[in-house]
Amino acid sequence: MSNRTLPRLLQSPAVLLLLVWMLVPLSMTLYFSFIRYVLNNLRRPEWTTPALSNWRGFGNYEFVLKSKDFLFAIQNSLLIVCSILFLTVILGVLIAVLINKSFPGQGIVRVLLISPFFVMPAVNAVLWINMILDPVLGLQGIAVAGLNEMVAGLREMPVLGGFFSLWPEFNPISFRATQTSAYAVIIMVTWQWTPFAILIFMTSLQSEDQQQKEAAILDGASTWSQFRFLTLPHLGRPIAIVVMIQAIFHLSLYAEIEIVSRGNGNKNLPYLIGEFANNNIGAASATGIFAVILANIVAIFLLRMIGKTLME
Amino acid sequence: MAIVAQNSKYGQTGRTILAWAVGLLFFFPIFWLVLTSFKTDADAVKPEFLFFFTPTLENYTNMTENYDYWRFATNSVITSVFATIFALAVGIPCAYAMAFNPSRATKDVLMWMLSTKMLPAAAVLYPMTFLTKSLGLFDTHFMVIIVLCLINLPIVVWMLFTYFKEIPKEIIEAGQMDGVNTWGEIKEILIPLAWGGIASTALLCFIFCWNEAYWTVRLTTTDAATLSKLIEGNRAPEGLFFGRLSAVSAAAVGPIIVLGWFCQKQLVQGLSFGAVK
Amino acid sequence: MGRIVLENVTKSFGETQVIPPLDLTIEDGEFAVFVGPSGCGKSTLLRVIAGLEDCTSGKVFIDGEDMTQISPSKRGLAMVFQSYALYPHMTVRKNIAFPMRMAGMPEDEQNKRIEAAAASLNLTDYLDRKPGQLSGGQRQRVAIGRAIVRDPSAFLFDEPLSNLDAALRVGMRLEITEMHERMKTTMIYVTHDQVEAMTMANKIVVLQAGVIEQVGSPLELYHKPRNKFVAGFIGSPKMNLIEGAEAAKHDAHTIGIRPEHIEVSTTEGLWQGSVGVAERLGSDTFIHIHGVDGCDPMTVRASGDVEVRHGDTIYLTPDATQIHKFGADGLRME
């Protein structure tokens, strides 16, 4: 009877919408990636409209692979995502364990801690790069300047002055520079997503078996062994989930990179695509396909890892 | 308890201080943003006015003048609200069917949905721009709503699915025995029972829509531009206008942070897809 | 009216067949109990009758009408679930009214029926509470009330008492039996507890692995179990099954003797053994005896308090008229 058809009918709008949303633009990207397609070209105006006659085969892919930015963008994507994952998990576990047991003001501290998660990425970037990390006007600049002033003051001292005069002048770090802009992104995203990790770990800690803990205490386990052998294994699943969800979000980081340095010295794949898309749609599409492949590799890996636990 | 109590006299105090320190540290940037928003642009960059300054509401009162804040905010509200409503309208029946009439494909469909979320948006940037422009939908509320709805749909379905799964199947079956049709089941039983879950799903979807900064920036120019676009378009070069930028930023994130405070517990369960309880 | 006939019904989940072809008739007004160990398919069978599961093949008739393809609500059956499945967001009154509201019954008729049901189930004072504020037994009554008001042709109960504590269980057992006596409506009741089956049913259906092992009245099953499985399942403590030389004396592969049909003596008897644990219930003593050839331990039910201690030698004599004989295929031999 209708036992099978009705559920399908109810699911179909969502499934169809997502299917269209995924397939239509993606197949266009695939098509564009095999043709010469640029937005402006005075010498070859025929390239400015997508057509099969402009077939380029794997030319766009070769072009992208040979471009110096591509490998850099992949490395940078991985650097950013992996660093953020590493930092958020470590910080998340430590802070979650720290605030798990009740203490005065626990509720307030929790509210304080969770807040960054809800900050709009654009605001996050603007806030950090301008008001905190800016080498002159941000807090960093002000702090470094203050420190230098203090050291300068100490040099005037009669006896110890000689010691302090050996100290160098401190230089603020410019986080917009080529080498450092990735770190700025890592810092701000870590700040935003550690609360998420804390929240999940804390919830998980609350379901930890207290009797098991008490048994361990009676067995003479130290605080460290309790953490190492009971708490950490208990957190395995939430850690996997935190890793997966963050990977989903961070592989497509964009606003932060755009705002910090306009991709200067700090591109990831989405940003590179955006740059190509200013003119060379063919190359942008080929990069897009690479990004899809990379995302699929990550997705398969992650879904394999935790797919089963999710369905239970 | 006695064993724990031995080393906990100083430990307790130390932990409390440390916990508060960490909490304040994490909150500090937000505090700083709000604090700066009460300084004039000139004061905001002067080290001597770091914490002590004459507060002013000027930045907030001038928000409309300087940034046309309300237009962007209205767009954010409209697009986020409607995207959330559509996502729920499509997501609830889907999650209902998956939770109570699972087939062998259900698991794969759910996983596939999640994997669409992993597709990098940038990969389809140009086709999307091309399509929206050729359909005449560029910079329209409609397009932003559709896109926001679709990018959040997988998460919405997942969250709802985990909430619905917690409803005992027997209650739905009792409804079937009692003679409700599918629509009645959703309206009379499912929605009242999963109300909390649906509300927090809606809230999270709304938050994600509000904060979305890829498509809203790229598929709009002015008419349908949201707060993300406003902020991204006005990142101050080298410290100019810190005060007013802070005010508009604070006004963009404030409501969402407060919303988030109220539903943090439900969010965890939903966001971790029910795997963490 | 409520005569339910299953014809050649099978049920498979994917590749696994949980119910091989099965025929069963439940007459109008009968109290039928499906009993069997967990996983035997008794709940599935009930759900097939209810229409909550499709049967893979075969037909379900209710009052002569083929209901196989009809949706659950149109079969005219009411079901009481193990977890009660009350709607937690509705008051007791609304819970009971729900099926009538869905059927579009006029409001005053609804109220009349609710009042009547509440009165007979002692729920009148609780009509405006929500299920969360009720005790287990009260929730159970609400679930029954919700079933009664529909005036169904048959009631289906899916292990309804298993979430109650022991004392309440006995009370509810009596109430449901009483209700059946009063209403004379067909009831199908699923349980894994053979005591419930024995005390409530007029017809017991013993199931194992989806197969009906025996259908009959409680005493039929007690006195004439069709095979070893039924013999072991019905009756408490379990029937002692003896194999080997002792069985061969009766020309059987296995003989069975119930604990209450064995005479105990400290001086003489047919079999000899040593006392293991003696469980004293006051009215009876269950003695577990080791060392009897072909059956270890053997359980004996002696009435009153018997003076035995662990390790005592004890002599047993079975009541020869009460010996059940089973062949090598496990079936009863006459």
Image (cartoon, coloured by chain):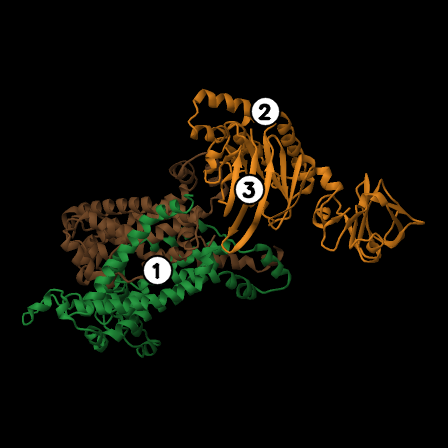
Chain colours: A green, B brown, C orange
Q: Which residue is mark 3?
A: C7
SS class, disc 2: helix
Amino acid beneath label 3: Glu
Quadrant of the image containing the N terminus of chain B: bottom right
Q: Quadrant of residue B2?
A: bottom right
Horizontal side of residue C306 vs C181, given as left or right: right
Marks 3/2: CA–CA distance? 36 Å
Question: Is residue A101 visible in this depiction of the protein?
Answer: no
Q: Which residue: 35% across, 76% down?
A: A160
Amino acid beneath label 2: Ser
SS class, disc 1: helix
Q: Which residue: 16% across, 58% down?
A: B130
Image location (x, y in percent) of residue A126: 24, 59
Amino acid beneath label 1: Ser
Compare residues B212 and C124 and report the one nearer the observer.
Answer: C124
Q: Which residue: 26% across, 51% down?
A: B148
Compare residues B103 and A202 and report the one nearer the observer.
Answer: B103
SS class, disc 3: strand
- The answer to the question of whether label 1 and label 2 lie on touching residues, with beta carbons closer than 8 A, is no
What subunit carries mark 1?
B
Tell me the crowding category of disc 1: few under 14, some 14 to 19, or many 20 or more residues within 10 angstroms, Cα based. some
Q: Quadrant of residue A125?
A: bottom left
Please tell me whether mark 1 or mark 3 is closer to you in this view: 3
Image location (x, y in percent) of residue C215: 66, 41
* Farthest left residue in view: A42
Q: Which residue is mark 1?
A: B115
Q: Which residue is mark 2?
A: C120
What subunit carries mark 2?
C
Marks 1/2: CA–CA distance? 56 Å
Please tell me whether mark 3 or mark 2 is closer to you in this view: 3
